[in-house]
Image (cartoon, rainbow, N blue to C red):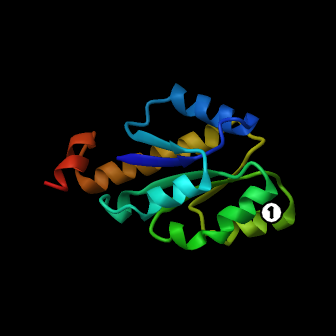
Amino acid sequence: MRIILYAKAKTKAGQRLNDRLKEVNLRAKIDTYTTIDGLVGRLQQTGYTYDRRIVVVLAASSKELSAICAIKESFRDARMILIVPDRKKDTISAGHRMYPRYLAYADGNFNDVVAVLEKMVSNSQAASGTGHDEQSDRSMFI
């Protein structure tokens, strides 16, 4: 199981999210991307079953959220947790148009994000019939 994370580590929210994710054992590898181009490149790669792809996206600003919304089609096969930069009505509306499984806010402590991720990973592993699937990910390509 792999989680794809987009967050700019240089932002306070990005650093808090990275720190929070390091504190927990999600039983999944986290691939972190700090540029939208890198994220899009990863999302376009094949090799993982679509029903198991989990993406966490932290938009640290309204400008960044707009850029993420512009690549909405790249997320169509992923289960997404979207973290928006503020609680403004327009921001929340734009976030919901991305059809995330969960919408969180960048000013939070990310306990909710971790709880949702843990549940998504658990459900994914239960559906695939594996406990820890690093090896089973590789065996899909043999």
Left or right of 54 on screen, residue 6: right
Looking at the image, residue 44 lies above or below residue 109: below
Q: Quadrant of residue 26?
A: top left
- In the image, residue 134 lies at what x, y percent? 27, 41
- In the image, residue 8 lies at what x, y percent? 66, 42
- In the image, residue 33 lies at what x, y percent? 54, 46
How many marks on residues? 1
Residue drawn at point x = 86 percent, y = 59 percent: 88
Residue furthest to the top in view is: 23
Q: Quadrant of residue 34?
A: top right
Looking at the image, residue 40 lies above or below residue 130: below
Left or right of 46 on screen, residue 75: right
Q: Secondary structure at mark 1?
A: helix
Tell me which amino acid carries mark 1: Thr
Residue furthest to the right in view is: 88
Looking at the image, residue 4 lies above or below residue 132: below
- Binning the other alpha carbons within 10 Å of mark 1 as few (below 14), some (14 to 19) or many (20 upward) gives some
Which is more toward the observer, 134 or 116? Answer: 134
Residue drawn at point x = 74 percent, y = 68 percent: 94
Which is more toward the observer, 26 or 50? Answer: 50
Residue drawn at point x = 75 percent, y = 34 percent: 12
- In the image, residue 38 lies at what x, y percent? 53, 53
Left or right of 110 on screen, residue 45: left
What residue sits right under mark 1 in the picture? 91
Which is more toward the observer, 89 or 127? Answer: 89
Residue drawn at point x = 60 percent, y = 69 percent: 71
Left or right of 80 on screen, residue 62: right
Image quadrant where one finds the C terminus: bottom left
Which is more toward the observer, 8 or 50? Answer: 8
